[in-house]
Amino acid sequence: MTNKKRYYFRWQLKNFLFFILLLFALTNIYTRDIEVSSRQLTARKIM
């Protein structure tokens, strides 16, 4: 394995991890928004 290849592989891995974290954060925010909106809807139905 050449030095350049190793460096490129490491860079790819970093990007991959960053992408996974970003995806996780987005889904987290998205599901929280859904929970909040559904709660508001049920609260309105009760009232």
Image (cartoon, rainbow, N blue to C red):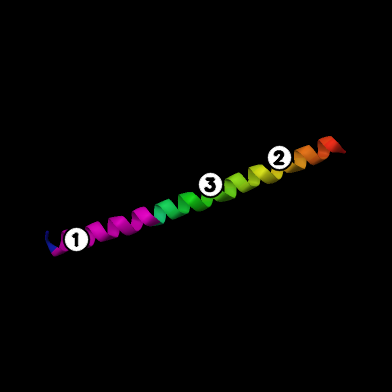
- The boundaries of the magenta stretch are 3-17
> In terms of depth relative to the viewer, which is nearer, 11 or 42?
42
Q: Is residue 44 left or right of residue 23?
A: right
Magenta residue check for 7: yes
> Of the residues shown, which amino acid type is indicated by label 3?
Thr
> Of the residues shown, which amino acid type is indicated by label 1?
Arg
Quarter holding the N terminus? bottom left
Magenta residue check for 2: no
Q: Are marks 1 and 2 in contact (CB under 8 Å)?
A: no
What residue lies at 55% left-to-right and 49% top-to-bottom? 28
Residue at label 1?
A: 6
List the single residue furthest toward the top. 45
Q: Is residue 46 left or right of residue 34?
A: right
> In terms of depth relative to the viewer, which is nearer, 4 or 1?
1
Cα distance between the residues tagged 1 and 2:
48 Å
Q: Position of residue 7 (x, y in %)?
A: 22, 62
- The numbered mark, 1 or 2, whose residue comes first in the sequence reads 1
Q: Which mark is residue 38?
A: 2
Secondary element at image label 3 = helix
Secondary element at image label 1 = helix
Cα distance between the residues tagged 1 and 3:
32 Å
Residue at label 3?
A: 27
Q: Position of residue 18 (x, y in %)?
A: 40, 57
> Of the residues shown, which amino acid type is indicated by label 2?
Ser
- The numbered mark, 1 or 3, whose residue comes first in the sequence reads 1
Q: Main secondary structure of the magenta part?
A: helix
Residue 37 sits in which quadrant? top right
